[in-house]
Amino acid sequence: MTYQVAVVGTGDPAQPDRYAMAYLHAEGYARLDSCELLACADIVEENAETFATAFDIDLSHVYQDYKQLLTETTPDIVSVCTP
């Protein structure tokens, strides 16, 4: 079985001390054969798009509103990486 993963709160890659958690979570999931990154959300759309590009998430699964993410996708796991 492959678990579908979503990340909420991708952070700003220009500020490493503020985005490491989401990227560390995603790197961990990417190492697992049983997990696939499905979607991401961040209130700053550009941050979410950068994250999606880094982890090969389809840009149609990039959201500014986590509620919309949860309505339009069906992740098995959600990593909440907000302060």
Image: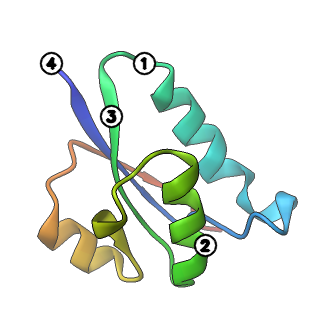
Q: Nearer the viewer, mark 2 or mark 4?
A: 2
Q: Is residue 46 above or below residue 24?
A: below
- Which of the two discs, 4 and 3, labels the residue nearer the N terminus? 4
Mark 2 → mark 3, Cα distance in angstroms: 20 Å
Mark 2 → mark 4, Cα distance in angstroms: 30 Å
Density class for disc 2 (Cα within 10 Å; few <14, some 14-19, many ≥20) is many
**Does the residue at mark 2 contact the one at mark 4 (Cβ under 8 Å)?**
no
Q: Is residue 69 above or below residue 16?
A: below
- Which of the two discs, 2 and 4, labels the residue nearer the N terminus? 4
Residue 47 image label: 2
| Three-letter residue code for mark 2 | Asn
Residue 3 in which image quadrant: top left
**Does the residue at mark 2 contact the one at mark 3 (Cβ under 8 Å)?**
no
Q: Which residue is mark 4?
A: 1
Figure coloring: rainbow
Q: Residue at x 34, y 74 (%)?
A: 66
Residue 36 image label: 3
**Does the residue at mark 1 contact the one at mark 2 (Cβ under 8 Å)?**
no
Q: Residue at x 23, y 79 (%)?
A: 68
- Which of the two discs, 2 and 3, labels the residue nearer the N terminus? 3
Residue 24, given in percent of the width and then of the height, sits at 65, 39
Mark 3 → mark 1, Cα distance in angstroms: 8 Å
| Three-letter residue code for mark 4 | Met
Residue 55, given in percent of the width and then of the height, sits at 51, 45
Q: Secondary structure at mark 2?
A: helix
Q: Secondary structure at mark 4?
A: loop
